[in-house]
């Protein structure tokens, strides 16, 4: 289920409020590890750091109904995660894709912004060698996607979306290489008020490197 926020000044505020809300939730409402709890779980079961920050780059790929209306393009994301358990993390992600509106005469530039919250389930680290580890993950979440055309007089489109993701992370010492594939699904009208609402799908493929604390 999704909501079409077209031609509404409320949508950008909803997107920002959604992202700020999840950050505040992670900061104030996710339970930490008390000393008593730490003594029960033991250091071996706790992640090295509960906070993770990752900046990634990759590609935005429209599929299905979107394939003929907007082009693929470069994608940049920033993700803040809180590790609730070694096998589970909550995350807030902001993304910016540079695309083009193929339905206009000059294929005008199109900025696609996404604001997502979600969770992921992780496998245990697989020890490939003395220094190399490998783990995989699957996840999902919801968010808001905004399609902002740079053509004068063009109406922007805002819609709720859901996503599913999978990927892996390769570790070497303190360095982690993360590969993430997400499939976003929305149900909205196309840009410019043309046509009926329909289900649309977009793929986001990203890679990023982060450092972990010891």
Image: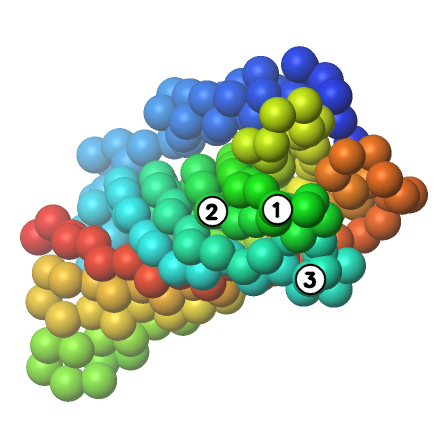
Q: Marks 3 and 1: CB-CB under 8 Å? A: no
Q: Is residue 129 left or right of residue 170?
A: left
At which x and y percent is residue 85?
A: 38, 50
At which x and y percent is residue 179?
A: 37, 66
Q: Nearer the viewer, residue 23 or 186?
A: 186
Residue 163 disc label: none
Of callouts 1 and 2, the N-terminal one: 2
Q: Residue at x 49, y 27 (%)?
A: 19
Q: CA distance from mark 1 to mark 2?
A: 16 Å
Say whether residue 59 is visible. Answer: yes
Q: Which residue is mark 1?
A: 106
At which x and y percent is residue 72?
A: 54, 59
Q: Nearer the viewer, residue 68 or 185?
A: 68
Q: Which residue is mark 3?
A: 67
Q: CA distance from mark 3 to mark 1?
A: 17 Å
Q: Marks 1 and 2: CB-CB under 8 Å? A: no
Q: Which residue is mark 2?
A: 98
Q: Residue at x 85, y 40 (%)?
A: 194
Mark 1: few/some/many CA within 10 Å (<14, 14-19, 20+): few
Q: Is residue 32 left or right of residue 16?
A: left
Of callouts 3 and 1, the N-terminal one: 3
């Amino acid at each position: 289920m999704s909501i079409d926020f077209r031609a509404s000044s409320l949508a950008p505020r909803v997107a920002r409020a959604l992202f700020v809300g999840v950050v505040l939730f992670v900061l104030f409402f996710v339970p930490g590890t008390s000393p008593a709890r730490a003594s029960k779980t033991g250091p071996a079961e706790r992640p090295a750091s509960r906070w993770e920050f990752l900046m990634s780059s990759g590609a935005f790929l429209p599929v299905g109904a979107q394939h003929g209306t907007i082009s693929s393009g470069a994608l940049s994301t920033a993700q803040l995660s809180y590790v609730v358990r070694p096998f589970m993390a909550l995350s807030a992600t902001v993304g910016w894709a540079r695309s083009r509106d193929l339905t206009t005469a000059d294929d005008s530039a199109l900025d696609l912004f996404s604001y997502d919250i979600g969770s992921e389930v992780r496998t245990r680290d697989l020890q490939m060698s003395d220094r190399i580890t490998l783990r995989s993950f699957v996840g999902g979440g919801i968010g808001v996607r905004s399609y902002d055309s740079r053509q004068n007089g063009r109406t922007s489109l805002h819609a709720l979306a859901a996503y599913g993701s999978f990927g892996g992370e390769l570790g070497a010492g303190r360095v982690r290489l993360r590969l993430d594939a997400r499939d976003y699904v929305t149900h909205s009208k196309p840009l410019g008020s043309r046509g009926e609402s329909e289900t649309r799908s977009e793929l986001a493929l990203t890679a990023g490197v982060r450092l972990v604390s010891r």
